Image (spheres, rainbow, N blue to C red):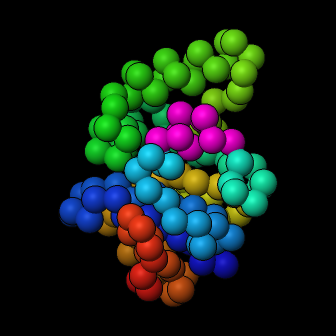
């Protein structure tokens, strides 16, 4: 299985969205990304549940992802997740402790989505030579 990466801002030190390899045919734009990470979108178009993985509150990567890719502040995301949990209308994302765990959990969980630093992908490439890089609106081989 390959891990699919979606660079939404191809700058050094930016953040890439990663999805389970089964989702490689599903293009992810910024609006879809916001809907997924605010837990408003709970299923992929084929009905498979979306499993969202995030880094811990206060982590540099989490802060960068919220600001750069979602266009919001981390405390706004936390308030959104707390509201859906406390009202009983949904679940918060699953928190992972490291980027390595993020990659492993996204790769092994059907319908999963998460994020990593763009430079971290290179650490994965020797073991996973068929990584697909998804840009806004399409995919290209990495």
Q: Is residue 35 magenta?
A: yes
User: 92 left or right of 128?
Assistant: right
Q: Residue at x 28, y 59 (%)?
A: 9
Q: Position of residue 6 (x, y in %)?
A: 43, 65
Q: Position of residue 107 (x, y in %)?
A: 64, 65
User: 43 left or right of 5?
Assistant: right
Instruction: Point out the residue furthest to the right here.
Output: 47
Q: Residue at x 63, y 41 (%)?
A: 41
Q: Is residue 17 above or below residue 78?
A: below
Q: Count all numbered tags in the image, as a single digit.
A: 0
Q: Quadrant of residue 73?
A: top left
Q: Is residue 101 above or below residue 4?
A: above
Q: Position of residue 105 (x, y in %)?
A: 65, 56
User: 34 left or right of 66?
Assistant: right
Q: Residue at x 71, y 48 (%)?
A: 43
* The C terminus, quarter of image: bottom left
Instruction: Point out the residue furthest to the top here.
Output: 87
State whether residue 60 appears in this view: no
Q: Position of residue 96 (x, y in %)?
A: 57, 43
Q: Quadrant of residue 121?
A: bottom left
Q: Is residue 5 above or below residue 130?
A: above
Magenta-highlighted residues: 34-42
* The N terminus, quarter of image: bottom right
Q: Is residue 61 magenta?
A: no
Q: Residue at x 62, y 58 (%)?
A: 106
State whether residue 140 appears in this view: yes
């Amino acid at each position: 299985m390959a891990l699919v990466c979606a660079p939404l801002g191809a700058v050094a030190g930016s953040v890439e969205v990663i999805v389970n390899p089964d989702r490689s045919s599903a293009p992810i734009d910024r609006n879809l990304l916001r809907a997924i990470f605010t837990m408003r979108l709970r299923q992929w178009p084929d009905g498979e549940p979306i499993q969202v993985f995030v880094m811990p509150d206060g982590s540099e990567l989490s802060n960068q992802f919220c600001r750069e890719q979602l266009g919001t502040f981390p405390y706004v995301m936390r308030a959104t997740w707390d509201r859906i949990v406390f009202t009983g209308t949904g679940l918060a994302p699953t928190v992972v402790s490291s980027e390595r765990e993020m990659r492993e959990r996204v790769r092994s969980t059907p319908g999963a989505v998460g994020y990593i630093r763009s430079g971290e992908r290179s650490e994965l490439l020797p073991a996973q030579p068929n990584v697909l890089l998804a840009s806004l609106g399409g995919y290209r081989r990495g």
